Amino acid sequence: MTAESGSGASSAAVPSASASAPPTATGTVTTAVPARLDRLPWSRWHWMVVIGLGTVWILDGLEVTVVGNVAGRLAEAGSGLDITAAQVTGVAAALYVTGACSGALFFGWLTDRYGRKRLFLVTLAVYLGATAMTALSFESWWFFLFRFLTGFGIGGEYAAINSAIDELIPSLYRGRVDLVINGTYWLGAIGGALLSILMLDTGLFPPNLGWRISFGLGVVLGLVILLVRRHVPESPRWQLIHGRGEQAEELVSAVERGIEREKGEPLPPPAGEITIHQRRSIGFGLIAGTVFARYPRRACLGLALFVGQAFLYNAVTFGFGVILTTFFGVPTGRTGYYFAVIAAGNLLGPLLLGRLFDTVGRRIMISSTYLLSGLLLFGTAWLFGRGVLTATTLTACWCAVLFFASAGASSAYLTVSEIFPMETRAMAIAFFYALGTAAGGISGPLVFADLTASGAVGDTALAFRIGAALMCGAGLVAAFLAVKAERRSLEDIAEPLSAARPSPAGTP
């Protein structure tokens, strides 16, 4: 199935397969589809992919922020739940992350096996259903159960969405687009913070209703995203590997024709071809062997990046509102204003720094964003421990920390989605997300909740320093092990496991 050196469809057929072969027929194919995707200019089609897939992070940010900000209200009499603030920011947060780890592994395996499109529709449906059930909570156990299931859905989203985005976006833009998409989580966080202010106003809504409406509005937004997502296609790269080469060629040809009409000029020829042995599925043994035996340095890098950002973000996201109310006397109905400010800092990080990951390079930018955020957090811990901060100045410090940390955290997802072979991509994302988040994301909320609940300034400062040390450690690992992936095709960064290698001289 060798593609022509233009934007047209391939004219050759799959060897050993007739023109009427089923779409899952396998064989050996030579194709330019990856190169054709990478040489595409930015277009309306790419915007459709970004909106259809990336906007779910807005929903995630909105919901997680709402939970953090309503923790105090849920613990108050009349909320409709017999639950404490520490249980919301500790137990419920840990269950949410546990569900996310489990969902990432489960749906990540299904994504590599059955395709990106099928799974990113299923995972969003699971996420929306569990969120709706959270809004109907009447007992603490019900709330805990559906926080776990909500996390289960979002974990699957991380695996399915990041793999699809990287396989559809041209290599020239992949870094900045991936960072900005993951960073839009914080656009949702701003909305969640402001929404919680409105929903927690007892002059507008009774204590047992406002927080439920907050979750319900998230479901409405998710349904709108689901309607857009239906139009996002399957990854042509996945189709090629899994015996759907003709579908991949047809899809890419249709995209090329649309872009040529939009731009009013023909596309340049693709840079090259690749020959692969198609297969219907990849076993866990081969995936594990590839990630750890073939790429041990990259595995170490992915784990370090995920542990650092997972501890910091899960702890802060679920615990910032409690810190404001415990140490600075900020009313529960006002914490949303402060969280909106640090969410804005998080959003600006990937927006302003994302382009540099494609120009300055991955190694410099990943290591520097992790190290800078860690050093600034050490400074924040020192100032907090001395008692010289107010609610406003603490928020300003966190805003500076998270400006760099957000870009670094987003680059963790970018890194593991592009440095391993295509056949393992979703599972690699799922594995490092699950393992890193289990190490940092489950322990983070529990440690943070325990230390902040003590009411001792020194304990909370210690929690800050733990997060800072993990971020600095990850930055040092990236300085030595980060991969030069900027502006390179995914197949060049990590050769597909199915790629056909030239036979030794004299061998047929």
Image (cartoon, rainbow, N blue to C red):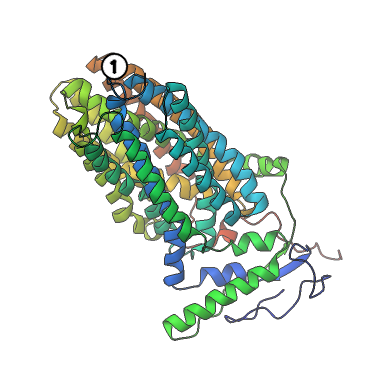
Observer-nearest of 206 and 36: 206
Classify residue 508 as left or right of residue 54. right
Quick one: quadrant of the N terminus?
bottom right
Q: Measuring 46% from the left and 33% from the top, which residue is drawn there?
A: 307
Classify residue 92 as left or right of residue 388. right
Graded by Cα atoms within 10 Å as few (under 14), some (14 to 19) or many (20 or more), the crowding at tag 1 reads: some
Image coordinates of residue 51 in percent, x first then y, are 42, 60
Image coordinates of residue 305 in percent, x first then y, are 45, 39
Q: Quadrant of residue 505?
A: bottom right
Confirm whether residue 299 shows in the render. no
Classify residue 232 as left or right of residue 365. right
Q: Measuring 36% from the left and 47% from the top, which residue is drawn there?
A: 185
Q: Measuring 42% from the left and 71% from the top, which residue is drawn there?
A: 44
Quick one: quadrant of the C terminus?
bottom right
Observer-nearest of 252 and 352: 252
Quick one: SS at disc 1?
helix
Q: Quadrant of residue 164?
A: bottom right
What residue sits right under mark 1 in the picture? 459
Q: Measuring 55% from the left and 40% from the top, which residue is drawn there?
A: 104
Mark 1: amino acid: Asp
Image coordinates of residue 366 in percent, x first then y, are 39, 46
Image coordinates of residue 325 in percent, x first then y, are 21, 24
